[in-house]
Image (cartoon, rainbow, N blue to C red):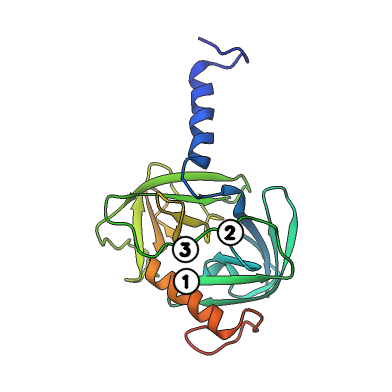
């Protein structure tokens, strides 16, 4: 069976379900998920993801910004924004980029607590290809993934779609569309790690308290 557009019905349904997944979460605006393209001090280019949380600020992961010589933030209309400064916390793998201008995006809200085991969360990212996508899964019961760099401050959700390189720093959202933490790591199959909500909110509070225009070097726990 085909649709009026000439597409097989199964293909059409798959496309519709993918679009619905991007916009299904109440309160989330996927257009505020951004792609980060940077150059390290060694001259190597890398990519990551992030989310606009208001006041010229992008939430991402520490390992996305650490060691960066320059960064460009691109929204989904391919508009470019530049980093005035950035700060990060390697203990919790949380980072923030302060932009030189207002991107005009709707900010995500940070959640006030972690989702309970079994609850659904949705992650957004661009992967290594730069194609925006969303994938959902269920929070696990205090299970720690086998990554060597995993910490007790990270949580896991499982999904049929694995996270990919370039998704790091993308927002993981609860069913209300609030960010519970940035996507941090994956086992490459079904398990994805994210920094838990308490640590994400603590890092943001420190970021605000220490000044958004500070250099990358700042007092502990910022490195």
Residue furthest top as drawn: 1
Q: Which residue is mark 3?
A: 110
Residue contact between numbered discs 3 and 1, judged by CB atoms under 8 Å = no
Q: CA distance from mark 3 to mark 1?
A: 16 Å
**Residue 105: percent from the left, percent from the top?**
65, 56
Identify the residue shown where x is 36% and y is 66%: 154
- At mark 1, the secondary structure is loop
Whether the residues at callouts 2 and 3 have beta carbons within 8 Å, the answer is: no
The furthest residue to the bottom: 219
Please determine whether, in this image, residue 139 is positioned above or below residue 5: below
Q: Earlier in the sequence, mark 3 or mark 1?
A: 1
Q: What secondary structure is found at the residue carrying circle 3? A: loop
Q: Position of residue 144 (x, y in %)?
A: 30, 63
Toward the viewer: 53 or 144? 53
Q: Which mark is residue 93?
A: 1
| 1 on left or right of 100 | left
Location of mark 2 (residue): 107
Residue positioned 49% across, 77% down in the render? 205
Determine whether the residue tagged by mark 2 lies in a helix, strand or loop.
Answer: loop
Give the number of callouts.
3
From the top left corner, tell me how far across and down residue 197 is, in percent: 39, 66
Contact between marks 2 and 1 (CB within 8 A): the answer is no
Q: How many other residues sit within 10 Å of disc 3, few (<14), some (14-19) or many (≥20)?
A: some
Classify residue 108 by image quadrant: bottom right
Report how far apart the C-alphas of labels 2 and 3 lie in the structure: 10 Å
Nearer to us of marks 2 and 1 is 2
Residue 175 in percent (x, y) is at 40, 49
Mark 1 Cα shell of 10 Å, populated few (<14), some (14-19), many (≥20): many
């Amino acid at each position: 069976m085909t649709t009026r557009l000439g597409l097989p019905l199964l293909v059409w349904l798959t496309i519709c379900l993918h679009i619905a997944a991007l916009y299904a979460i109440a309160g989330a605006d996927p257009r505020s998920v951004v792609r980060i393209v940077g150059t390290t001090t060694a001259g190597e280019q890398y990519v990551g993801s992030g989310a606009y949380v208001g006041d010229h600020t992008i939430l991402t992961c520490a390992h996305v910004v650490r060691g960066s010589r320059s960064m460009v933030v691109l929204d989904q209309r391919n508009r470019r924004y530049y980093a005035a400064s950035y700060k990060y916390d390697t203990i919790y793998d949380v980072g923030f980029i302060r932009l030189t201008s207002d991107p005009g995006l709707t900010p995500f809200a940070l959640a006030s607590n972690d989702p309970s085991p079994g609850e659904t969360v949705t992650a957004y990212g661009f992967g290594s290809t730069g194609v925006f996508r969303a994938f959902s899964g269920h929070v696990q019961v205090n299970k720690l993934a086998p990554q060597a760099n995993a910490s007790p401050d990270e949580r896991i959700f499982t999904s049929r779609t694995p996270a990919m390189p370039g998704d790091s720093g993308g927002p993981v959202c609860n069913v209300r569309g609030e960010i519970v933490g940035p996507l941090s790591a994956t086992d490459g199959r079904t398990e994805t790690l994210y920094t838990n909500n308490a640590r994400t909110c603590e890092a943001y509070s420190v970021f605000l308290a220490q000044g958004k225009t500070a250099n990358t070097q700042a007092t502990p726990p910022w490195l």
